[in-house]
Image (cartoon, rainbow, N blue to C red):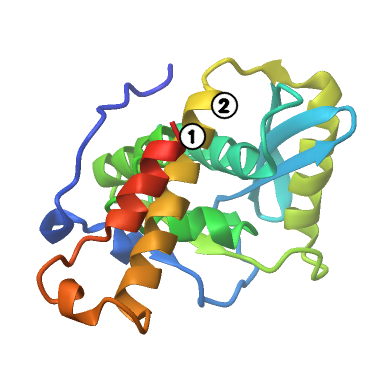
Amino acid sequence: MKKKITNLTIHPSLFQIIDQISTTEPYKEGNSLMFFTDGSKTEMGTGCSYCAFENGIKVLEWKGKLEKFHTVFQAELMGLKEAIIRASQGNEITKIWTDSLSSLMAVLDPHTHHQLVRDIQSLLTQNRNILVRWIKAHAGYRDNEEADTVAENAIIEGVVMKALNPPCEFKQHLEEMIFKKGQNLWDNGSTGRSVHKVLKKSAISSTMRHLAH
C-alpha cells in the first residue's frame, strides 16, 4: 500500500531534508538494499523507473509510462518519488541513487512551487531514514545502467501515470525562471540604482511573470 503524502509547505528554518541529500558522496557497491531511479524520453514517449538491488541482485523493478508531452525532468522526478514511496515501507536506512542532478537541486529548494518536487520534499520529511544520492550517468555503474534500460522499456510497458498536470507545472516552472531572471537583471543592472534602493523587488520581473499567464 502506498504511503499517503501530506502536502507540506516547509518553512526554510524547518527545512531539514538537506541532511538526507548529497551530490558529492561517491558511489560504492554494497550488500544493503539500494534503489536506482531514472527517466527517459524518446520520439515514442516518456517513461520512468526504479530498480532495487540487494547483494548485487535486482530484487525490485517498477516502470511508469507518461504522456509524450511530459518532460524528462518530470519523468526523473516521478521515478524518484515512486522509489521513495516504495523505500518508505521499510524502517532501515536506505539510499536512493539518481543521475538527475537537476532533480536534486529542485528538491533542495525550500521555495519551490513545483507540486511533484513538493511531494518528494514531504515524503523525505516524513521518512528520515531515506537518503538520496547523485550518481554520474553512463559511467559504467551496472545498477544505474539497468535503471536507465528499465526507464526506456517503461515507455512501452510501464504503468500509465496520470498524476502529472504538465500545462500547470510548466507554467509554474516558467514563472519561476522568468521571475528569477528579471530579479537578477534588476539587482545586477547598471541603471535604475537610485530606484533600486527603494524598490528591491523588480517591477520587470513582476510584469514578466504576469505575461507568463
Amino acid carrying label 2: it is: Pro
The answer to whether 13 is drawn above or below residue 152 in the figure is: below
Quarter-of-image position of residue 100: bottom right
| Residue 125 point in image, percent of width and height | 26, 45
Residue 67: mark: none
What residue is at 85 percent from the left and 22 percent from the top? 156
The answer to whether 63 is drawn above or below residue 192 in the figure is: above
| Mark 1 → mark 2, Cα distance in angstroms | 8 Å
Compare residues 181 and 44 and report the one nearer the observer.
Answer: 181
The answer to whether 144 is drawn above or below residue 45 in the figure is: below
Amino acid carrying label 1: it is: Lys
Compare residues 54 and 126 and report the one nearer the observer.
Answer: 126
Quarter-of-image position of residue 123: top left
| Residue 174 point in image, percent of width and height | 50, 44
Residue with the mark numbered 1? 171
Quarter-of-image position of residue 4: top left
> Which image quarter holds the C terminus?
top left
Q: Is residue 80 left or right of residue 106?
A: right
Residue with the mark numbered 2? 166
What residue is at 56 percent from the left and 64 percent from the top? 134
What residue is at 65 percent from the left and 59 percent from the top? 99
**Dot 1: what SS?**
helix
**Dot 2: what SS?**
helix
Q: Is residue 83 left or right of residue 57?
A: left
1 or 2: tag closer to the N-terminus: 2
Mark 2 neighbour class, 10 Å CA radius: few under 14, some 14 to 19, many 20 or more:
some
Which numbered disc, 1 or 2, marks the residue closer to the eye? Answer: 1
Q: Is residue 195 left or right of residue 212?
A: left
| Residue 196 point in image, percent of width and height | 19, 73
